[in-house]
Every structure is written in C-alpha cells, then in structure tokens.
Amino acid sequence: APVGFNATQFVTLRYRYHGGLRNFKLNRLGKTMVDVSRIDDKELRFENVYVHRPIKTRCPMGNMKRMNKHSAFVAHHYVGSWEQWSYRDDPRSWTRQRQGMYESQSNGRETDDNIRGWLQGLVDEVGHTVASELL
C-alpha cells in the first residue's frame, strides 16, 4: 500500500484468495453486465430482476453457468473475515449467519494480483490528500 495507508484496512489488499476461474462450486453463477444503450426500451421494462439473467431475451440460460475463464470481465468477491461476512444486512441473512456457509465460501486457494494496484493508481491519479479524503 502507498505510504500513509494501511493495507489491512482494504479487503482487496488484505484478502488475496478466491475460488479460481474454474471452480464453480465456490464461485457459483456469475453476474451479467449489459450495455443498456444497445437494448430497446421495451426490453428494459421488467419485474423481478434476476441478477444472473436480467434480460431473458438477451441473456441465454446456457450462459448462466459459463466458466469464468471464458468471460470477458471477471471480478472476484473476497469473503473477508467472519465478522465482515456475517454483519451484512442481506435479505438472505440465513446464509450469512451460518458459520459453515462462511467456511465453505472462504475456502478459495487461488490468487492473483490484478486488483491490488488500484490504491496506488488512485493516489497517482488524484494525489495522497484527495485519496485520503475519499477513503
């Protein structure tokens, strides 16, 4: 971390392990990114949005289980500590409060450093003072 920042205060710097690109058991279903500027307004009116398949006419069922290694964009979720994971106000709180679920989700053993440069990049872009104020 840049001088003046404590790496242990940032989940993306403190926790390095994730499930890996081929581990569906840990990663589960991916999320979908949609360029809505290319979608007709009629297709954007819907109820009960499913984050894994928000526009059924454009997001085929077969892509829901697409392996991350075939995706153009991958963002890892870092589980963090038990305290961080279990405090969230999540409508699926039953999953968040079970220690066993946390242990299975925090079992990732692959790592990469692709995201770790973001803090230095922010400091380089806006300066130390502004970065400190933003964070």
Image (tube, rainbow, N blue to C red):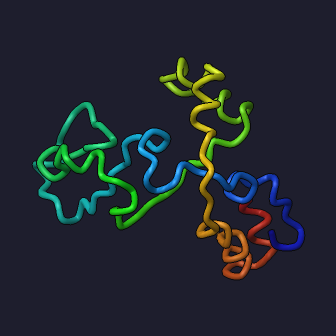
Residue 34 found in image quarter: bottom left
91 up-or-down from 29: above or below: above
Q: Residue furthest bottom?
A: 124
Q: Quadrant of the N terminus?
A: bottom right
Q: Can you tell which quarter of the image residue 50 is in?
A: top left
Q: Is residue 98 left or right of residue 35?
A: right
Examine the rendered structure and indicate whether residue 126 appears above or below residue 70: below
Query: Could you say where residue 71 lies in the image, as x and y percent from the top left?
Result: 35, 62
Q: Position of residue 96 (x, y in %)?
A: 58, 25
Identify the residue shown where x is 81% and y is 60%.
7
The x and y percentages for residue 85 are 65, 33
- What residue is drawn where x is 23% and y is 64%? 37
Vertically, is 97 above or below 75?
A: above
Instruction: Residue 108 in the image: state x and y as whole percent.
Output: 60, 46
Q: How many marks?
A: 0
Q: Which sits in the foreground, 126 or 79?
A: 79
Q: Residue at the spot x=63%, y=39% of the render? A: 106
Q: Quarter of the image containing the C terminus?
A: bottom right
Q: Nearer the viewer, residue 67 or 76?
A: 67
Front-lying residue, 28 or 120: 28
- The reply, left or right, for residue 97 in relation to residue 41 is right
Question: Is residue 116 depicted above or below 51 in this figure?
Answer: below
Q: Residue drawn at (32%, 52%), measured in percent from left and top?
A: 32
